[in-house]
């Protein structure tokens, strides 16, 4: 599994392969209200309250709530929507919805602030994994903080409903244990200042890329993804055709990659190469006793075959594989039949009519693993062809393998759950509908560090996309990536730093966005730093500034506003300084770099504090064009202010003789 998804490798998920149908189920079992509205729910204060659901077409729907009454009329497929006047914080209230002879009532609804908490594993990380878990869980009794977890589900088209049952629950030791620690500690801290009920909606997936969280329309508008999005749309209509097309795309990548050998096509029957016999038990290749694979991360090819009768080959069938760690590309008789990024999960791929044949059928699987154990799990009996009559023919036990060393990274299919396009938006964000929110918290980026230069565009796309759904002025609070990895001994290029810079720039360009700096609360050895309490405090401080407009509360720590060249040095000016600039662990600030435009390596600069400026001295001061600070995966950063808040990583262009 990837290191970004390691902790969540056992998480179960299902990926939808057909379009969501607008047809409603039988009236007797379809809830009148969307499942977001339940006992203990929190609705956003001071904004119009929109309620929606399904009812029989032509049957008026009446909503009664907090002395208000509204009537809605379902459309031709039963969808209805009603809007109530804004209310101040308070509760508890009861809501009753009636349509004809049917009615639903809900108790203990509160009016307060609703927050959406989304991202990858550091947002998903639960309270039981954070610092002081036992004590925090035991003390977690906050009846006015309500928790709602969106079921994990990936889909190829937008879904109207959640994949599983959902519920709101007040914070108790039992309910908070598995909830997002960052989200919970944020609300707990913010409620000390903003004493209103708070509803927390967790929609997070470990190892996910940002592209998975934006709608297909938003990604199309961003540009450069039309072909992949067309393939995603095809998979919603015809899964087999999409997999075959993806197999051709993958094969083209393989044969055209740098260093490719002409004629090398391992997915074809009789392909050459030094194929070796795999252990009968299969399992992680690191445990095969093969020195070259003992600590190997990369691609390994597997192949075997299955012999069928003519009657069997004529049936509809699926290829069933045991768990794969982590990404597979699978062929049958040279045709691509499936690909998933699903660490530790089995595969089941429908086979298109006419693909199987009487006699020998060739099965080839490329497995990519990038962290820890990898491979095709045993036992051998887990791998088979299953027919429509539920009979099953096991694949031959004579598996062979062929390692493919190198730095090549294969393309990712657009329907992959955590790494695809729009998959998590479709399965987890779209089903939320468009409730009013107080704000959105976003902690993601680790899985995009391989292409950090593109992250700013991706983040703007997500911000604008979600605002179209939840409200044009919905604030966005972004967690800047925490430090991870050992500090470098010299200036280096860093995808992590590029993502942090993108997060900083996107937050700075929008008055309804803000950045929570977390560089100093990372862990060099753990990509999931456990100090989510401090992160919660910083997010709460950020919310007070950005969302609540408390001008006396700086959004974070010192913020670099300009870098100016003088005849003797470069001066970096900081705003949002509480008290004065100070350093920790060193007499002077460290971590500042000066960079030239000619592509030469950046160099460290000596630094001194002068009021709210940091003065940089270096032989490169007169030729440098940029200044960087804390530019590494896991840098050492020593600059703070008197409040203890750190200055965050940044890169700025050096201006000539500019005024502050």
Image: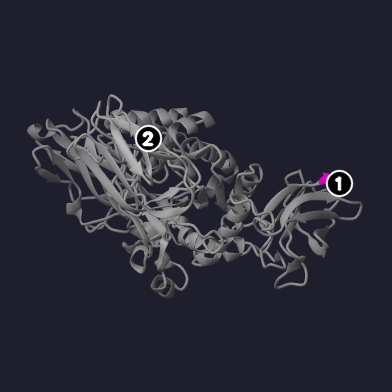
User: Where residue 191 sits: x, y (%)?
Assistant: 51, 61
**What secondary structure is found at the residue carrying circle 1?**
loop
User: Where residue 610 sits: x, y (%)?
Assistant: 84, 63
Q: Is residue 286 above or below residue 259?
A: below
Q: Which residue is mark 1?
A: 659
- Is residue 445 shown in magenta? no
Please, what is the dominant secondary structure of the magenta stretch?
loop
Indicate which disc, 1 or 2, sits on the residue closer to the N terminus. Answer: 2
The residue shown at (59%, 42%) is 456
**The N terminus is located in which quarter?**
bottom left
Depth check, mark 1 against mark 2: the one in front is: 2
Judge by depth and name the residue closer to the eye, 573 or 234.
573
Q: Is residue 86 left or right of residue 457?
A: left
Q: Which residue is mark 2?
A: 82
The residue shown at (17%, 47%) is 396
Q: Provide the residue span drawn in magenta.
A: 655-660
Rounded to the nearest angstrom, the CA distance separating label 1 from label 2 is: 54 Å
Judge by depth and name the residue closer to the eye, 290 or 32.
32
Tell me which corner region of the image, top left, top right, bottom left or bottom right, holds residue 388.
top left
Categorize mark 2 by other alpha carbons within 10 Å: few (<14), some (14-19), many (20+): some
Q: Is residue 157 above or below residue 436?
A: above
Q: Is residue 586 left or right of residue 349?
A: right
The residue shown at (51%, 48%) is 438
Whether residue 524 is visible = no
């Amino acid at each position: 599994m990837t290191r970004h998804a390691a902790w969540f490798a056992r998480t179960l998920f299902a990926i939808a392969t057909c379009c969501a149908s607008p047809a409603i189920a039988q009236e007797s079992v379809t809830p009148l209200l969307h499942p977001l509205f339940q006992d203990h729910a929190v609705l956003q204060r001071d904004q119009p309250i929109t309620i929606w659901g399904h009812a029989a077409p032509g049957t008026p729907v009446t909503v009664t709530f907090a002395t208000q009454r509204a009537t809605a009329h379902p459309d031709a497929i039963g969808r209805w929507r009603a809007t109530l006047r804004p209310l101040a914080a308070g509760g508890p209230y009861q809501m009753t919805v009636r349509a004809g002879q049917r009615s639903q009532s809900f108790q203990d609804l509160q009016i307060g602030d609703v927050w959406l908490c989304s991202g990858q594993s550091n947002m998903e990380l639960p309270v039981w994994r954070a610092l002081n878990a036992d004590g925090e869980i035991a003390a977690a009794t906050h009846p006015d903080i309500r928790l709602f977890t969106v079921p994990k589900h990936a889909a190829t088209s937008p879904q109207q409903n959640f994949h599983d049952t959902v519920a709101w629950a007040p914070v108790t030791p039992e309910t908070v244990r598995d909830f997002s620690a960052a989200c919970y500690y944020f609300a707990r801290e913010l409620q000390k200042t903003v004493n209103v009920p708070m509803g927390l909606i967790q929609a997070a997936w470990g190892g996910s890329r940002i592209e998975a969280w934006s709608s297909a329309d938003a990604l199309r508008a961003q540009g450069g993804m039309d072909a992949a999005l067309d393939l995603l749309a095809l998979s919603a209509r015809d899964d087999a055709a999409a997999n075959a097309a993806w197999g051709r795309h993958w094969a083209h990548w393989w044969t055209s990659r740098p260093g490719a050998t002409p004629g090398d096509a391992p997915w074809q029957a009789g392909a050459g190469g030094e194929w070796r016999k795999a252990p009968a038990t299969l399992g992680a290749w690191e445990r095969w006793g093969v020195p070259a694979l003992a600590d190997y991360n990369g691609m390994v090819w597997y192949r075997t075959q299955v012999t069928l009768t003519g009657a069997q080959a004529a049936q509809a069938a699926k290829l069933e594989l045991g768990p794969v760690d982590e990404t597979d590309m699978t062929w049958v008789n040279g045709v691509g039949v499936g690909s998933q990024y699903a660490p530790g999960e089995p595969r089941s791929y429908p086979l298109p009519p006419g693909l199987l044949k009487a006699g020998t059928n060739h099965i080839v699987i490329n497995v990519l693993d990038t962290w820890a154990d990898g491979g095709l799990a045993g036992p051998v009996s887990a791998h088979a062809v299953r027919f429509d009559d539920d009979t099953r023919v096991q694949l031959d036990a004579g598996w062979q393998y062929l390692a493919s060393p190198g730095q090549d990274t294969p393309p990712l299919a657009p329907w992959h759950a955590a790494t695809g396009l729009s998959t998590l938006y479709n399965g987890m964000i779209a089903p939320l509908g468009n409730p009013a929110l107080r704000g959105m918290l976003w902690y993601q980026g680790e899985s995009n560090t391989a292409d950090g230069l593109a992250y700013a565009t991706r983040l703007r796309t997500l911000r604008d996309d979600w605002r179209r759904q939840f409200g044009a002025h919905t604030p966005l609070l972004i967690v800047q990536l925490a430090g991870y990895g050992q500090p470098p001994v010299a200036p280096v290029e860093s995808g992590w730093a590029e993502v942090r810079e993108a997060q900083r720039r996107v937050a700075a360009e929008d008055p309804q966005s803000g950045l929570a700096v977390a560089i100093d609360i990372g862990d060099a050895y753990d990509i999931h730093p456990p100090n989510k309490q401090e992160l919660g405090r910083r997010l709460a401080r950020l919310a007070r500034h950005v969302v609540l407009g408390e001008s006396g509360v700086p959004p974070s720590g010192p913020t670099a506003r300009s870098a100016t060249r003088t005849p003797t040095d470069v001066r970096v000016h900081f705003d949002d300084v509480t008290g004065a600039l100070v350093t920790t662990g060193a007499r002077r600030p460290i971590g500042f770099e000066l960079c030239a435009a000619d592509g030469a390596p950046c160099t460290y600069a000596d630094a001194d504090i002068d009021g709210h400026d940091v003065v940089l001295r270096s032989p490169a001061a007169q030729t440098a064009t940029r200044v960087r600070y804390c530019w590494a995966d896991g840098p050492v950063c020593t600059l703070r202010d008197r409040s203890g808040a750190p200055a965050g990583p940044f890169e700025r262009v050096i201006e000539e003789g500019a005024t502050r």
